[in-house]
Amino acid sequence: MTDTDLDAAYTQLCSTLTNAGQAQTPLVLARFALLAMTRINDRAAIERMIADAAEGLAPAQDIRSPA
C-alpha cells in the first residue's frame, strides 16, 4: 500500500465516521476492527496491533460517584 493509498483509505474512514455521527462512531469502529481481524487472521499480530494502538494512552477515568 502506498502512502497515497493509505491516505485515501484513512480519508474514507474519516468520512464514514463523520456520516455515521458521534453516537454511531464506536459501533462503526468496532465493526471495522472485527472485519480487519478476520482479514488479518493472525492472533499474535492482532494482539500486537491492539497493544500498539493503546500505547501511551491514559487510562479511562472512573466517573462513578465516590462511595
Image (cartoon, grey):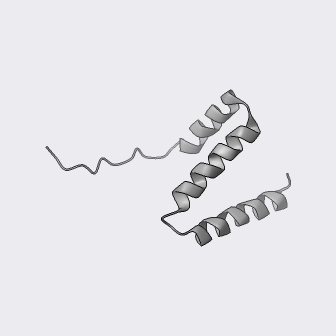
Q: Quadrant of residue 44?
A: top right
Give me the residue at 51% from left, 44% from top: 56
The one nearer the camera, 49 or 36, is: 36
- Looking at the image, which is closer to me, 32 or 5? 32
For residue 2, side relative to residue 52 (left or right): right
Residue lying furthest left: 67
**x and y percent of residue 62 in the render?**
30, 47
In percent of width and height, residue 6 lies at 78, 57
Q: Position of residue 39 (x, y in %)?
A: 76, 41
Q: Residue at x 38, y 47 (%)?
A: 60
Quarter of the image containing the C terminus? Answer: top left
Farthest residue toward the top? 44
* Observer-nearest of 6 and 56: 6
Asked which quadrant contains residue 55, the reply is top right
Report the residue at 66% width, 69% height from top: 15
Q: Position of residue 8 (x, y in %)?
A: 78, 64
State which quadrant residue 4 falls in. Answer: bottom right
**Total numbered badges shown on the rendered structure:** 0
Q: Residue at x 67, y 29 (%)?
A: 43
61 sits left or right of 16 in the view = left
Residue sitting farthest toward the right = 2
User: Which residue sits furthest bottom?
Assistant: 19
Vertical order, 57 against 44 (above or below): below
Q: Is residue 43 above or below residue 10?
A: above
